[in-house]
Image (cartoon, rainbow, N blue to C red):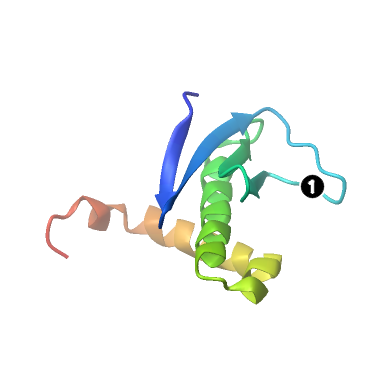
Amino acid sequence: MKNNKVKIGYKEYEIVKKEEIIEVAGVYYGTTDYEKDKITIASKYPQSHQNQTFIHELLHCIADKYNLTELNKDEHTIELLAVGLYEAILDNSHIFTMKDI
């Protein structure tokens, strides 16, 4: 995959895919490095899982931008929001192609 970028406020995060993401505690599908402005997604999982992981990391970036420190620490809530948002996007993809909503 060609590296892409996503802009959140004044920051532009580079999106990188790697076969495996090595972390000490637990299993990670993606990470965000706020100092290097980089989102890394594990590419060894199905595309749908990578997409949901991207939304998860995107929510972390948004929480960081708005100093939502407690939300940013709450992996469970971030994951629930990511799953719900991804499902809403999949179930209503036609909305994102409409010119007037």
Circle 1 residues within 10 Å: few <14, some 14–19, many ≥20 = few
> Disc count in the image?
1
Q: Could you say which quadrant of the image residue 91 lies in?
A: bottom left
Question: What residue do we see at 57% from left, 56% from top?
Answer: 56
Q: Is residue 6 above or below residue 78?
A: above
Q: Residue furthest left?
A: 100
Q: Nearer the viewer, residue 92 or 37?
A: 37
Q: Position of residue 15 (x, y in %)?
A: 52, 37
Task: Please indicate whether residue 44 sits to the left or right of residue 89 in the image.
Answer: right
Amino acid type at circle 1 is Val
Question: What residue do we see at 74% from left, 36% from top?
Answer: 21
Q: Position of residue 14 (x, y in %)?
A: 51, 38
Q: Residue furthest right?
A: 24
Q: Residue furthest top?
A: 2
Task: Please indicate whether residue 94 sits to the left or right of residue 70 in the image.
Answer: left
Task: Please indicate whether residue 42 sits to the left or right of residue 50 in the image.
Answer: right
Q: Nearer the viewer, residue 46 or 33?
A: 33
Question: What residue do we see at 50% from left, 70% from top?
Answer: 66
Q: Nearer the viewer, residue 94 or 67?
A: 67
Q: Position of residue 68 (x, y in %)?
A: 58, 73
| Residue where numbered disc 1 is placed | 27
Q: Position of residue 64 (x, y in %)?
A: 57, 63
